[in-house]
Amino acid sequence: MSTLKLVVEAGPDAGRQFDIKPDGASIGRSTQNDIAIADAQLSRHHCKVYFLGGELWVSDLATLNGTLVNGAPIKEDAKLAPGDCIAIGDTTLRLTDASASAPPPAPAPAPEPSPKPGAPIDLGFNDATPLPRTGLPPARKTLYRALAAFLAFCFLAVVVKLLLGDADDPADALIPAETASEEVLQIHYVKIEGSAENVFRYELALAPNGALTVAIDDLSQGRQVRKASEKPVAAELRADLVRKFANAGFFEMEPRYEGIPRENAWNAFTLTGIVNGRAATVEVRNRLEPGAFKDLREAIETFARNELGLWAIEFPREKLLELATENIILARRYYDERAIRLDNLFNATRTYKSALAYLDTIEPKPEFFDAAVTELGVAEAELETLFKDKNWQAEHAVNTKNWELASSTLRELMEIVPDRADERHRDVERRLLDVEARIRKLKK
């Protein structure tokens, strides 16, 4: 059990102490956090502390004011040790270890002196005369009999309760029905790829409460990435993973698949899954993975990428550079052909963003990074100008009640921004429905 605590040394809640549970704690202004602090300078969900490999880490949740550890702002998750200070907003938290500073146990109290032989024993009933040694007064006999009867009644009630069940227990009403049947899933997954030049390690942990953490270590590049989910993974997503474990036949797989390492290449995949108390570990070393195992572990990696928004971090630096270069070449092609198709300018901006996302965890940045940022800015500015000009044409057509022209122009706008998740696309789609309804009405 963790003995670590966070003590508020400065800020509106100075003096408060918080135990850190084994599954970590979220910190912020919102009362939905495990540690809610009444500091107006904090974000609603500001940062999170979590355990990974037996050590405590802190992760800033992309906040405006940031998170500082020992006076230095953190750009990636930072490892903590007792005595470290976390500064967030106007609040300073210090990490302490209760086991290191626990006071020695207090000495046992000295036993009370035994009464002298023959001395009267006062039981608090204020009788003027000492109690006779041969029995209790009638009043006390009645009191003890009533107490014994009450205890017997309580014992009988407990027995009946155990035999008949407790379907109407109010405590049960506090537990949602779906919680009782919710499947419990725990995952620990490690991928290691090694050579004489580098060792790349990817570790994922999903706790039973839905807390997700990922750790990346790329030794040759000195790259370390630590990320944790801001909130528990949704129950339906965990249920989907449980189904994937079942479909893969994970618990029927052999515990170990081992081959012979290739020259200057070594790899290992270790996956532990616990589903509703049933546990198994499967390890694959230096050989082609069984198809079902590969599908399952790739599904787990995809799940983590989507949940943490870090879909590129598990690749080595060389692979990230390769992917970024390919995307920049494709983005430039889209941009050069922007006059051929209306969606090419949008595709150019999206592909530039993908390239920059691949480079997000790489330091130092490659030489082409600055050029890619500049080119993205140019493409975004042109896209905004194109959208505004075409949008003005659509509005003018609507105002002049040229419904056919309005319809065709709005369709062009939807091609310019083809992403249905984009608010601009959804707005144009709503307007187009209205225009087409007017056209149908006029044709009647």
Image (cartoon, grey):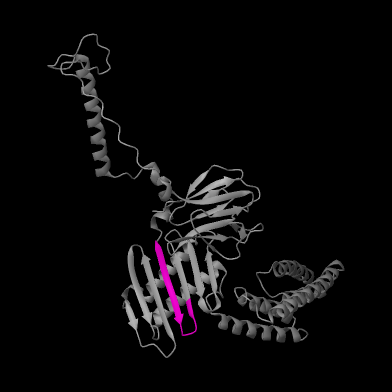
* x, y percent for residue 260: 36, 88
Give the quarter of the figure containing the C terminus.
Answer: bottom right
Q: Nearer the viewer, residue 229 or 364?
A: 364
Q: Report the number of discs.
A: 0
* x, y percent for residue 425: 71, 70
Q: Nearer the viewer, residue 209 or 38?
A: 38
Residue farthest to the left? Answer: 134
In the visual, does 84 lie left or right of 255? right
Q: Is residue 364 above or below residue 8?
A: below
In the visual, does 321 lie left or right of 257? right
Q: Is residue 303 above or below residue 148?
A: below
* x, y percent for residue 133: 14, 16
* x, y percent for residue 44: 61, 53
Magenta span? 184-200
Q: Nearer the viewer, residue 30 or 358?
A: 358
Residue farthest to the right? Answer: 400
Q: Residue at x 66, y 79 (%)?
A: 351
Residue 406 location, quadrant: bottom right
Residue 29 visible somewhere in the drawing: no
Magenta run includes residue 424: no
Q: Residue at x 78, y 85 (%)?
A: 339
Magenta run includes residue 189: yes
In the visual, does 224 lie left or right of 422? left
Which secondary structure is most common in the magenta stretch?
A: strand
Residue 384 visible somewhere in the drawing: yes
Residue farthest to the top? Answer: 128
Q: Residue at x 64, y 79 (%)?
A: 355
